Image (cartoon, grey):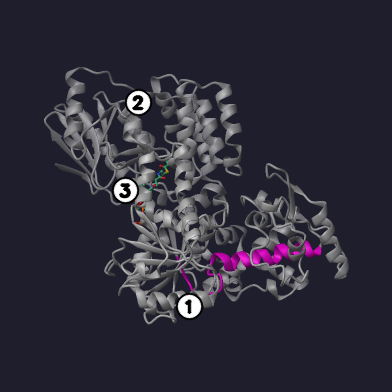
Amino acid sequence: MAAINSVTDLSNEGDVAVITLNSPPVNALSAGVRDGLYEGFKAAIADDSVKSIVLICDGRTFIAGADISEFGGERKGADLPAVQDMMENSPKPVVAAIHGTALGGGLEVALVAHYRVAVPSAKVGLPEVNLGLLPGAGGTQRLPRIVGAAKALDMMTSGAHVPAKAANAMGLVDELVEEGKLREGAIAFAKKVVAENWPLKKVRDREVAGATPELFADFRKANARKFRGFLAPEYNIRCIEASTLPFDEGMKVERKLFMELMTGPQSAAQRYVFFAERAANKIPDIGDDVELLPVKSVGVIGAGTMGGGISMNFLNAGIPVKIVEMKQDALDRGLGVIRKNYENTAAKGRLTLEAVEQRMGLLTGSLALEDLADCDLIIEAVFENMDIKKEVFGKLDAIAKPGAILATNTSYLNVDEIAASTSRPESVIGLHFFSPANVMRLLEIVRGDKTSKPVVATSMKLAKTIGKVGVLVGVCNGFVGNRMLSSRQIQAQALVAEGAMPWDVDRVLYDFGFPMGPFAMSDLAGLDIGWSKEKSSSSTIREVLCEMDRRGQKTGAGYYDYDEKRNAKPSPVTEQIIKDFAANSGVNPREISDEEILERTILPMVNEGAKILEEGKALRASDVDTVWVNGYGWPVYRGGPMHYGDSLGLAKVVERLKHYQDKHGDFFKPSALLEKLAAEGKGFKDLK
Ligand code: TC6
């Protein structure tokens, strides 16, 4: 075996040259990998004893894509198109041997091979769309030539990782080889290609099937809502439209649109989010040496919406769950809802009936807290009230086995105070799931003063096991997410008190990219959360709405009026209530511009995020952004509130906050950290 460079080897197995990449963690197409490929193929093509060439990777995966960390940096190493030209024009058949994932630029390299083989566990895909990009190395032109326009649209706008078997059925993979025997299988395949004189198939020479104008029009229409605000899906679609042109013409379209995306703010934000989510896993004082606790069984207290959703996460991951409720009917209802959720998923074809039964088989219900004695992890999801939580934890302390993790799902209460009601605060942690808990990706992991390192490390690992993005946060009112949400809510209400209508505030935030505005959200959740008739004092618009039985979508009216299909309409009733409130409090309602609505709802969040960082309640600004993107519908193409602050420039943020501080008081006072960064001409990105 000859080393081509530090990440590439070339060896001859008889007359088959095998180029092996070994560039951990994911064999991304870094400058070194591109150089290795270039030199490796050049040498193999020049070697007269070689009749065919296999490209294979060591480690956990085939090439997982371009090296995203190189984007925007100085260009070094061989050009990818030059590597691809050499492979595609090789006079000797080239076979790509795929395991793990062939993604993005990785699949685009495989697509210039003349043949592709894969093990059954492999996956292939073009996930660039999720980074705000399109496959800029010929993928947009080659993929449709193999799988047809319709499937290319699905794959490229979803970024889905397609399993090898399905890829084989689509013609993307020519042959499946036995698991664990990729190298031998690929070499045998290459020999067969030579022995049987198979043609040097170039994908670029093929025709695209099914690229009709109706296909594109229908696809755009069907996905308009999903793609709203994003540039990349539309640009991917345009490239597939261009794949009906001669290959080189299509490539020009791809290049132009790729460069536009690559240099634009959306992709910068989406790439930032990719690394932010991974950075969140790294906890400075917790290394690999911290012992992980076993979590083989989970207990959940409370079978309501939250408890049920939380349980489903573990069932989905194959971990048995025991749910405890106080009353039989509540327990039956809770278990019934879980079954129904699974059956609904099965009815949509996304789960087999067998899998439904298998998951339900892992679930048991109980009316006795004592039944949780053998659980490794117990999550409390009862009513949000400190006294109740303390009582539950006091009891758990007496019941749970030593070493069990005791978690609270509180969304804002003091985890240290809850922990103090036990004799083992080191075992107590907050696991704040977001509703619906089986769907939302965010998990705020709340580290108490005394929470032990193994408990923190195990919780972070567990988040990954159940498919969540775990973010470590400190104890403070509302933690990171709800604390910042609260500053937005305060301003949303203040704007309405000054003359904006709820639908104006909602529209501005919807247009910014949130799935819905705060008032539509309240109507969905129910205006009567935390409200009771007896204690109602008619002192807020919300209370008056509840008193009129306008409690949100469920009663057909709240801030908005709803028709029977739950379509929202601005409500003259709400408008009148707001006007009456203004008149009674002596406020002269004024026209409020969209710009003011946006600044007054968003900039206080940036400011609150800065305070959170100042107080050390989040480890890094990108953690705050990860919370908002994954838990609160912050548009991913705007990167999160802190990234957004940076993109505006913190000097501007401070200037606008001061402007509102002059008019509306110290709520808008910029935090010391914000002032400092702005004065130094820095951003949150510069914090270390
Ligand atoms: C593209 O190809 C564009 C082409 C245009 C033409 C030029 N680059 O996710 P994990 C790192 S766009 C650099 O935890 P998993 C990651 O940061 C690209 N680094 O592992 C992490 O580092 P850390 C298209 C990368 O097993 C480590 O690898 N490709 C890249 O859960 C492990 O990652 C994609 O979008 C990269 N491309 O999942 C694929 N990928 O340990 C993106 C990963 O220092 N990648 N890293 O924190 C993935 O989807 C997943 O990483 C995975 C592995 C499925 C490959």
Q: Is residue 391 left or right of residue 642?
A: left
What is the spatial separation of the Cα atoms under label 3 and label 2, in whole angstroms?
A: 25 Å
Which of the two labelled residues, at mark 3 and mark 1, occupies the earlier sequence position? Answer: 3
In this rendering, the answer to whether 141 lies above or below 280 is above
Instruction: Give the mark, 3 or 2, whose residue is nearer the N terminus.
Output: 3
Dot 2: element: loop
Which is more foreground, mark 1 or mark 2?
1
What residue type is disc 1 on? Lys
The percent coordinates of residue 21 (x first, y second) are 25, 43
Crowd around label 2: few <14 · some 14–19 · many ≥20 (10 Å)? few
The residue beneath circle 3 is 26
In this rendering, position of residue 139 left or right of residue 43: right
From the viewer's perspective, tell me whether residue 513 is left or right of residue 626: right
What is the magenta range? Answer: 472-498
Tags 3 and 2 in contact by the CB under 8 Å rule?
A: no
Q: Closest to the observer: 411 or 551? A: 551
For numbered disc 3, what is the local secondary structure? Answer: loop
Q: Amino acid at mark 3?
A: Val
The answer to whether residue 22 is visible is: yes
Q: Which residue is mark 1?
A: 390
- Residue picked out by circle 2: 171
In the image, is the residue at mark 3 within 8 Å of ligand 1 by its beta carbon?
yes
- Residue at left offset 21%, top offset 17%: 197
| Foreground: disc 3 or disc 1 | 1
